Image: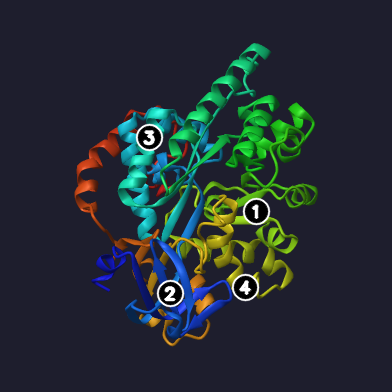
Amino acid sequence: MSGLSELTNRGSYALAPELVLTPEGALSDMVVQVRDGEIVQVGPRGLVAAGTAVVDLPERAIVPGFIDAHTHLGQAFGKAITGGEPAQIWRRIWTPMEGSYDAETVYVSAKWMFLEALRGGFTGIVNFAVLDGEKAAALHQAATDVGIRLVSATGAALPVDGTRQPSPCDIAKAIDGALKQAEAHIATCKGQPLITPSLCVPAVQSAPGEMLRALSDYAAAQGVMFQIHTNEHHVEVHWSVCTHGKRPLEYFADHGAVGPHTLHHHCTLVTDREIEILRETGSAVSYNPLASAWKGDRIAPALGFAARGVRFGIGTDSTRSDALRLLESAETAQRFSQGMQNADFSCGAAWTWIDAATRGSADAAGLGEVTGQIAPGQRADFLVLDRRQPEVTPSWDFEWELVRLYNRDQIEAVVVDGRCVMAQSRPVGWDAEDFLKTNRKRARDAVGAAPIIRCHGRSADFRNR
C-alpha cells in the first residue's frame, strides 16, 4: 500500500483487491481499472486493457467513497460546545461563531474539517453556508489544497420571524442581490472540476416566499441544487403553522422550493402527506441521524423514505466526520425509532444505509452521474479497506460488517478523482500535524471572540448535580 499514492499519479492503473463493493453487491475476483481519474472497467482480470499493469491488493476491499450530504464547514472549532445544549443551537452558537470569521478563518476551518472528513472516509462534502465571494474563494482554495470533492453553497437570508417585517422594497432588493451573488458564484465554480455550485436559504424563518421561489427557480434554470433546512425543529414547524397556516414543507411547495433540484435537510418532523410531497416532486432529503441524537431532534423516517421511493442521502450536520460510524448511527437510529416497535429485525438491512451514504448522497447532491458507485463512467472516488483485522475476520456478510464492525483505522487509502489524497490516515502532499499545530491558537481565538451564548455549560460543571 505504500506505493499507492505514486501509482495513482499515473494516467492509467488497475487495482485487484480481494473484494469490490459494486452496485450489484460485494464481488470478488474483480479488477478496477482507472484512466484519467475515471473508472473505465470493473470486471475480471482478463478484461483489463492490454499494457495496463494490474496491482494486486490482497486482503483489501475497494468501496465507494462516502459523501456527507449535509455539513457546515465553518463549525470545525466548536463542536463539543454544543454538548448538552437545548435545541436552536444555530441561533446561540453556530451563527454567532461563523458570522465572526474572516476569509482566512474560513479557509482554516474548512481545511480542518476536510482533514477530519478524509480520515473518516468521506470523498465528497455538501456544504451549507451563505458566503460572499471572498469567503467562498477561501473555501474553494481549501478544497483544492486537500483534493476533496465539494458542493459549495451561497444564497441569501432575510429573516421574517422578527418584530420588524421586510417591506416589498426590502424583499425586491434582497432578491436582486442574491441573484447577482448566485450568478457570480456559479461562474466562479466553473472550471474547478472538484467543485460544484449550489444555492441555499437557511430555513422557513429566513426568507419570504418570494425569495424562496426566486432562488429555487434560478437554481433549477441553471441546473444547480437548491438547499434548505426543512421541518427540523418543533419551534420552526410551530412558527410556520402560526404564521402561514402551513407546515414548512407545505409552504415551500406553495412557493416552488421543491423538485428534483432541491435538497431538504433533516425532515425529521414530516407527516405522511409531506412525505408524499417529497416523493411526488422528486425532492431529495439528507438524513442526519447523529444530529437527531446530539441535538434532541426527532429521528427522520428514513425507512419510510426508502419504502416510498423518496431520494435521500446521509449527512453529519457537523457532528462527527466518520463515515463508518455514521453508517452505524443511521441503522441504529431507525432500529430504535421504528424497527424495534414493529419487530423489524432487518430494519432496512445493511445495504440500505450503505447505498444511501454513497450513491444516495451523490444523487441528493446532484452528483449522481459523477460519483457514488464503483462503476464504469464514474469518477474514481473510493476507499481501500484493510480486511485483516479481528473485528471482520472471518467475514460472513461484508455489508453488515461495513455498517457495524469496520473502523476508521481500517481505511488504508482515500482516492478522489483517481488520485490518492489520504494514506494511512495521513494526507498526501501536505503536513497535517504542522497545520493543526500552526492553527490551534486561531481555532481557540475564533471561538473565544464570537458572541456565543452557552446554556448548559461544561460537563464538569454538572458532575455533582
Nearer to the camera, 222 or 119: 222
Q: Could you tell me if the residues under marks 4 and 2 are in contact, i.e. CB atoms within 8 Å?
A: no
Amino acid type, residue under disc 2 in the picture: Val
**How crowded is the residue under tag 1: few (<14 C-alpha within 10 Å), some, or many (20+)?**
many
Instruction: Give whichever of discs 3 and 1 has the lower sequence position.
Output: 3
**Residue 74 occupies quadrant:** top left
| Quadrant, the N terminus | bottom left
Secondary structure type for disc 4: helix
- Pointer 4: what residue? 349
Instruction: Give whichever of discs 2 and 1 has the lower sequence position.
Output: 2
Nearer to the camera, 302 or 68: 68
Total numbered badges shown on the rendered structure: 4
- Pointer 2: what residue? 32
- Pointer 1: what residue? 300
Nearer to the camera, 152 or 396: 152
* Vertical relation: 180 (above or below) 69: above
In x, y percent, where is residue 247? 75, 37
Amino acid type, residue under disc 4 in the picture: Ala
Q: Is residue 142 left or right of residue 328?
A: left
Residue 77: in sight, yes or no? no
Q: Nearer the viewer, mark 4 or mark 2?
A: 2
